Amino acid sequence: MHRSRLFGIFIDTPQGEAGAAAAFWSAALGTTATPVPGEEEFIALRDAFPGLAVDVQAVDDTPRYHVDIETDDVAAEAARLTALGAVVEVDNGGHRTLRAPGGHLFCVVPVQSEGDLFDRTARTWP
Amino acid sequence: MHRSRLFGIFIDTPQGEAGAAAAFWSAALGTTATPVPGEEEFIALRDAFPGLAVDVQAVDDTPRYHVDIETDDVAAEAARLTALGAVVEVDNGGHRTLRAPGGHLFCVVPVQSEGDLFDRTARTWP
């Protein structure tokens, strides 16, 4: 058995505009823009929504949103989701990027939530 | 004064693949796919995340995600967000589509949440 939950929304933004995007989104949602130490491409919009990570992520690509699913077993969760029809696009080992039926990219990542949020809210899969 | 909050994530999917996308995402997130009566382009993934709407939306466009901000005053909220740097792309009167600094589309819509969720969680703007 393993568990997973929707972890967050990522606002993927071209590198040169990430600061402006973070300033906008933090003001729009009434929160702060906090750089993530050691992960310079991420700017966290903490408490933008209860229990949901919302981050601006600087990318070398066009603007888009994506979502992350966090899990206590990345391999098992990726296997579950590919059995449902997703396709693995990038396998980083630690995390994987998949494409869903319909064409949307999303990531499967190890548990990132702080405290007992994951334990309280994740769904359990056989 | 008016109020707003992040309302939901919309999984915009080309018309012909919306059913497959809804089947995938409902299973992925451990919920059900429920057509929205009278709004046939929407398939609600109810309770995918506490307090957050997650819907597959059939579109005549390429796959993407977008977010909605709900508000008790669409005009005032659109004015607040354009003052922060967003640009109105489509003004439907009842709801508006804006583009944020960084390039992301999002919608400003009237309050959609059921019960007292909006009153309990919306932020108040001067």
Image: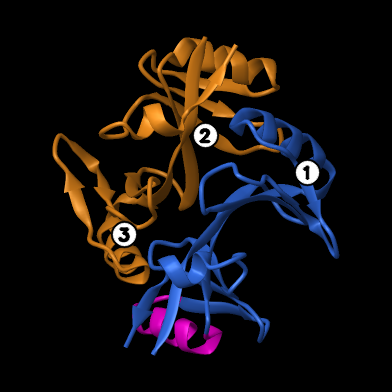
Chain colours: A blue, B orange
Q: Secondary structure at mark 3?
A: helix
Q: Nearer the viewer, mark 1 or mark 3?
A: 1
Point out residue B56 in the picture as x, y percentages from the top left corner: 33, 51
Q: Nearer the viewer, mark 3 or mark 2?
A: 2
Point out residue A83 in the picture as x, y percentages from the top left corner: 36, 84
Mark 3 sits on what residue? Answer: B17
Residue B102 or residue A1, whichever sits in front: A1
Q: Main secondary structure of the magenta part?
A: helix
Point out residue B84 in the picture as x, y percentages from the top left corner: 69, 21
C-alpha distance separating marks 3 and 2:
22 Å
Mark 1 sits on what residue? Answer: A18
Q: Label 1 amino acid?
A: Ala
In which quarter of the view is residue B83 placed? top right
Q: Label 3 amino acid?
A: Glu
In the rendered view, tell whether residue B100 sits above or below residue A37.
above
Task: Find residue B106 and name its label.
Answer: 2
Q: Secondary structure at mark 1?
A: helix
Residue at left offset 59%, top offset 66%:
A115
Marks 3,2: beta carbons within 8 A: no
In the rendered view, tell whether residue A90 sits above or below residue B93.
below
Start-end of magenta stretch:
A73-86
Crowding at label 3, few (<14), some or many (≥20) Cα neighbours within 10 Å? Answer: some
Residue at left offset 44%, top offset 16%:
B74
In the rendered view, tell whether residue A4 sits above or below residue B101.
below
Tell me whether marks 1 and 2 sit on the same chain: no
In the rendered view, tell whether residue B10 sits above or below residue B123.
below
